[in-house]
Image: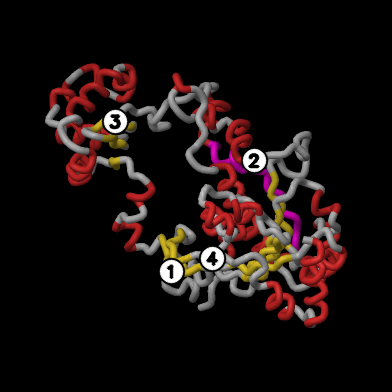
Amino acid sequence: MTAPFHNIRVLDFTRFLSGPFGAHQFALQGAEVIKIEPPAGDDTRTITVNKALAAQKMSPAFMAVNSNKKSVVLDLKQPEAIAAVLRMVAEADIVWENFRPGVMDKLGLGYAALSAINPRLIYCSISGFGHTGPEKNTPAFDGKIQAMSGIMSITGEPEDGPMRAGFALCDVIGGMTSAFAVATALYQRTQTGKGQHVDVSMLDASLSFLSTQVADFTVTGTPQRQFGNLSMSRKPTADRFRCGDGYIVLAAMTEPQFQRLFQVLAREDVLADPRFADWFTRYEHRDALRDIIESAFGQRSPAQWEAVLNAADVPCARVFNIEDVIEHPQLQSRQVLQTVASSVGTHRMVGPGFHLGEDGGAGSGVIHSPPPRVGEHTHDVLAGMGFDDDAIARLQGRITATS
């Protein structure tokens, strides 16, 4: 079988993270993703503290979500470039963009204009707040959405104030939501024969990922607060604990797991203590329970306790660094990281995060081509779409003259 999206062509106008991440999911599943870049390239190409990579416009942030794509440089400020895009749209399945609402319309590349050329077109727009509502024209970025969505208000320790997630969480949420939304629209097209506008709001998408916290408030009226590393179950044996020279996270949330935990810790007396008779009393006396656990954990290293607890079927994990987890045998056995030879060296990159079955399709989830250099595929892509050499030369000459 061929890859799932092998016959799908995407015109990718996105930049930074949310949009490129979404389109990247399609590139990993065999779609032809043509990245339309300005003469200077996607701004993310130079967002790095590594000066050498910035000079080559190959930042790690760019490389992470642009493998398997083709780069075509078009200066959308030029009428000739707009005309070229309109020709390309006729043969495209998807247009993906993450400009502020209205920007693509001003260029003559909004959904109304492009769907008139290609009624089967799926047109995905990602923005902070979507294309409707009072905030639709408000600029947005990941940190702002983390703050507005409520994510920061429930992250971190109460005494330290609100805390951002350690990565661009809302960008990635918006990107993954867009990939699912586009796949949904593509499936619907098989039934209707028509394309549609897919409007993705990063704020909306973030709230959908917070559905359990929202429901806990709307159903029970319970305010959502910071609980540090405590599980949302609020079970005190599902938390982070000091352990030897580091930390370990427990996820003992069932009664058998609770009992096995204290058997392993050689504290069977806890199981007979009325303070810890059930989960309600355990939460009430959680500080005392923490002292007991950390006193025992102090006797061994996180790795030693992890081995002992796992052997006893008590869910836990020591806290890994990124450099540790990428070497874990579990990830290696599933080939989560794939080796990519790029213009700036050979590196390992993360794939799609799932496997299709044995018949899932040749090339599914495989990084088969490196992140492209700026404009690397301009001539080949345009020629393949019927542009003659003179037309391509005029477009490239215009770019050179105005850059």
Q: Amino acid at mark 4?
A: Leu
Whichever of labels 2 and 1 marks the residue nearer the N terminus, that label is 2
Instruction: State whether residue 100 is above or below residue 253.
Output: below
Taking the spot 79% from the left edge, 76% from the top edge, the residue there is: 393
Q: Which of the 4 image quarters holds residue 287?
A: top left
Q: Secondary structure at mark 1?
A: loop
Q: Name the spot of residue 331 as percent of width and height, x first.
A: 35, 58
- Residue span colored magenta: 195-211
Q: Secondary structure at mark 3?
A: strand
How far, Cα to Cα, is label 2 from label 4? 25 Å
Whichever of labels 2 and 3 marks the residue nearer the N terminus, that label is 2
> Mark 1: few, some, or many residues within 10 Å (few <14, many ≥20)?
few
Residue 37 makes an appearance in the image: yes
386 or 287, which is in the foreground?
A: 386
Q: Which of the 4 image quarters holds residue 219?
A: top right
Question: Which residue is tagged 3?
Answer: 241
Name the mark on residue 28.
Answer: 4
Left or right for 296, reference 94: left
